[in-house]
Amino acid sequence: MSERSGEFARQVRAYLEYQLSQGVRKIVLPSPTGPARAAGGLEAIRDELGDCTRCPLSATRRTIVFGEGDPHARLMFVGEGPGADEDREGRPFVGKAGRLLTRMINAMGLERSEVYIANVVKCRPPMNRNPEPHEIAACNPFLEAQIAAVSPEVIVALGRIAAMALLGTKDPIMKLRGMFHDRNGIPVMPTYHPSFLLRNEEDRKWKAEAWSDLKKVMARLGLHVPATGNGS
Ligand code: URA
C-alpha cells in the first residue's frame, strides 16, 4: 500500500471508529466528485453540509466556515481550519493570518474575490489545536466536492495540515514546498501557512521562500511575475 493510500485508510478508520462510538450504524456517503455533485455547484455542497454534526468540532464551533471566492477560480487556497475570527464571522482567513494571505494574493496581482479560499475543516478546532484525523476525514468529502466544483488550475496548500490532507503525505512542509505535486491532475503547491510566517517574521527567509512558491504559481497561471518584491 502506498504512503498516500495508507494515510487515507487510517483516516477513514478513525472516522468510522468515531461514528461507531457515537452509535452510528449506517453511513450514507455523498459522492463528492461525481458529476451530479460538481454540476450542483458550491451551493448544493453547502446545502448538503447543512448544520453539520459529522464530527465533534460541531459541538464547540460557533459558525461553519464553508469557503468563499470565485466559484470558477483558476487558483484555490486551502488552509487548515477556522480560527476565532473566522468562527465569529463565518468567513475564511479574516483574522491576522487572513490579512497576510490577502496581501499575498494582492502581491500576485489578484483580488481575493478572484480566487477561492477554503479550509480542510470547516469548524474551528477548540483552542486552535490541529484538527484530528477523524475530523479531517469527516470534512474531506466536502473539500473534495469544493475542489471538483471550482475545478481550479492550481491549488496552494497553506501549511502542513493542508498539504497532508490534499496530498496524503506526512512529509514536513519544508520538504514539500517549492514544487508542484500532482493531485488527480491538479498541481498543488504547498507553502508556509500565513500564521507560521507571522510567528517567524524576524527571519525574512520564510517569507522569501513563500514568495518564491507563489511566483511559481503565478508562472504556472501565466500571470506577470515581478522580478522584485517579497510578496507582502
Ligand atoms: N487559519 C486557517 O488555516 N484558516 C483560516 O480560515 C484562518 C486561519
Image (cartoon, helix red, strand yellow):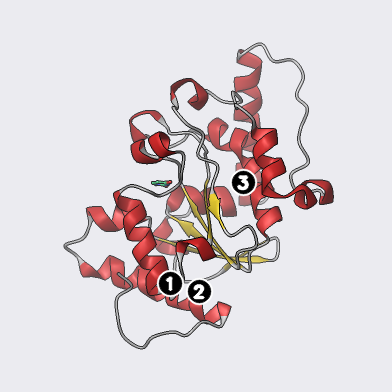
**Labels 3 and 2: the sequence-earlier one:** 3
- Residue type, label 3: Leu
Mark 1 residue element: helix
| Quadrant in the picture for the C terminus | bottom left
Marks 3 and 2, how far apart at CA? 21 Å
- Residue type, label 1: Asp
Badge 2 is on which residue?
A: 217
What is the number of the mark on residue 143?
3
Image coordinates of residue 131 in percent, x first then y, are 46, 35
**Labels 1 and 3: the sequence-earlier one:** 3
> What is the crowding at mark 1: few (fewer than 14 residues within 10 Å), some, or many (at least 20)?
many
- Residue type, label 2: Val
Name the residue furthest bottom: 227
Image coordinates of residue 64 in percent, x first then y, are 51, 34
Give the vertical position of 204 relative to 36 (above or below).
below
Between 157 and 45, which is closer to the camera in this rendering?
Answer: 45
Question: Which residue appears at 43% of the width and 72% of the height?
Answer: 213
| Whether the residue under disc 3 has CB within 8 Å of ligand 1 | no
Badge 1 is on which residue?
A: 213
